[in-house]
Each structure stands twice: as C-alpha cells, then as structure tokens.
Image: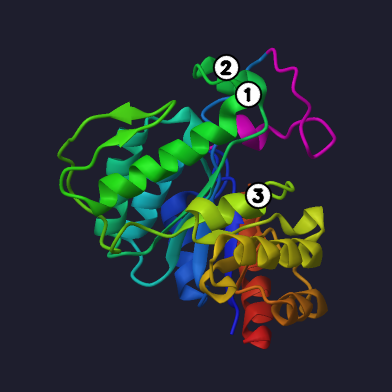
Amino acid sequence: MSRYGVTIFPTDYSIQPIELARAVEERGFDSLFVTEHTHIPANRRTPWPGGTDLPKDYWHTHDPLVALAAMAAVTERIKLGTGVCLVVERDPIQLAKEVASLDMISKGRVILGVGAGWNAEEMENHGVEFATRWKLVREKVLAMQTIWSEDEPEYHGEFVDFDKLWSWPKPAQPGGPPIWLGAQSKWAFDRVVDYCDGWMPIGLSGGLEEGLESLRKACERGGRDFESIDRAIFAAAPNEDACRKNVEMGFTDQMFALPSEPAEKILPRLDQLADLANKLR
C-alpha cells in the first residue's frame, strides 16, 4: 500500500510549522516534507528549472531542520522529511549531529531527502564548485552515515576528510535515517544504488515510468534489491487515476505539494487531499 504525505515551502508568510504539522497528523497523512534554500543571491544568473521567474518562496523559506524540530515536538506519528536538504551547502559533521538529534527527538521519524541543487551562485556563496557538487554530495552522505553508525568514525575522501572523532547522539534509526535522492538525471539511479535508500523524483517533471526502469537496471548492475529501495514521488499529481497508476508502477510514497499560503487557505486544501488519500488506501 502506498503512503501519502504533503510537502511545502514553509515560509514566514505561510501557515507556520507547528500548526501545519498538527493539521497534517490529525488528517491521517503519513508524512510531511519541507524544502531548503539558505538564500537566493540577488545577482542570480542560473535559470530556475521551473522555467519562469523564481517564486519568492525560495528566499523566504524557514531552515528545514528548525522547522522539522518544531513539527516533531507536536506530533507523534508522521514521518518528517527534507525535500531536499542541500547537503553541499552544509558541514557534514554538524549536519550529522543535527539530523541525529532530530531523529532521536522525533523517535525515529526522519527521512533525509538529499540533493545537490541547481543554483550555481547559491553554492558559490558556500564555497562549492558547481561542477563537482555531486561528488561532494556522495562524500558528505557517506561521511554522515559513518558518523551515525560508528563509535569512532573517520572518513578520508577528496572533499571530506577527518580522523577518528566522537559524536553523539546517534540516530534512533539504526545506521541513521533513510536517505532519499531527489534527482532525475541519467546518473541519479547509480547514485541511489551507491549510497541511498530511496529515489524521490519530482512528479510534475514526468519520466516516472522510465525512471523506475532505469533504477531497476542500476540495481542489477550494483547488486541491490530493487524492492528494498523506497520509491517516492515529490509533488505527485493530486489526481486519483494518476495516483493509482503511480502505485501500479511501483511507487511506495506520494507527497502532494501545498502552496505557501496562510492557514485559511491551507487547511481546506489539506481536507481535500486527505479525502483523496483515504480513497487511495
């Protein structure tokens, strides 16, 4: 049975994290995902993949881990995820501690969606070279997984390099929370097999069926069990027929996108999406 959740850019002008999390759990959803951008450079040159002017949501978004911590404090059941955490812009030792703390506080409810991002200027402000961003994602994820799993972890890579260290708390989920890769390029599937637990494409971008086939082939090449990998759609089309087709294709999770709007607009929309989710279960 597929699981159903929602995702939002949690901004300073939209419904706030605590009220939203309570509403999501009360309506029976399975998960709640939030986005990340540390900032948007005012002199941005990189085109937005959405194709039009960049929405202001992108530079008004709360820090995702702060928002999720607030959500964890007022919920008991729903999974809490990032869609996606831009790990290239974060220190892996500090991020490992933040995520482990969140996972412990939430009693093992974290899903860490990760990605490299698309905004070259944003990355440059963090000292990251666009051309090597995916190598950096891989090393940071592997380093965090080592920190979560070992008492005296160490990691020695091209970009991430540290000797043995002590870092607690460890996550409530053994080995750390599931890592879902939010990407759809031809290289994404081998990356999922290499260091992730799930694949999370954007539903509105299309190519879902072809992506699943590519993931199956990558699993065969890499010796991974396809069924062991979570397959989640970020921003799934809120349509009963489309959702049922996604389940038939083999997706395990579907998250519906919410607009960055105040509570008076979000709560009725949540009611509609909850009705849809109940029909699909």
Q: CA distance from mark 1 to mark 3?
A: 16 Å
Badge 1 marks a residue whose secondary structure is helix
Q: Which residue is mark 1?
A: 130
Dot 2, crowdedness within 10 Å: few (<14), some or many (≥20)? few
Residue 243 in percent (x, y) is at 74, 75
Q: Quadrant of the C terminus?
A: bottom right
Q: CA distance from mark 1 to mark 2?
A: 8 Å
Asked if the residue under mark 2 is in contact with the one under mark 3, i.e. CB atoms within 8 Å, the reply is: no
Q: CA distance from mark 3 to mark 2?
A: 22 Å
Q: Quadrant of residue 280?
A: bottom right
Residue type, numbered disc 3? Ala
Q: Residue at x 31, y 52 (%)?
A: 102
Task: Determine if the magenta segment contains residue 189.
Answer: no
Residue 133 in percent (x, y) is at 58, 30
| Among the two numbered marks 1 and 3 on one chain, the one whose residue lies closer to the N terminus | 1
Q: Which residue is mark 3?
A: 188
Q: Residue at x 79, y 67 (%)?
A: 209
Asked if the residue under mark 3 is in contact with the one under mark 1, i.e. CB atoms within 8 Å, the reply is: no
Badge 3 marks a residue whose secondary structure is helix
Can residue 236 be spotted in the picture?
yes
Residue interval drawn in magenta: 43-61
Asked if the residue under mark 2 is in contact with the one under mark 1, i.e. CB atoms within 8 Å, the reply is: yes
Q: Residue at x 31, y 36 (%)?
A: 155
Q: Quadrant of residue 274?
A: bottom right
- Most frequent secondary structure within the magenta stretch: loop
| 257 vs 268, nearest the viewer | 257
Q: Which mark is residue 124?
A: 2
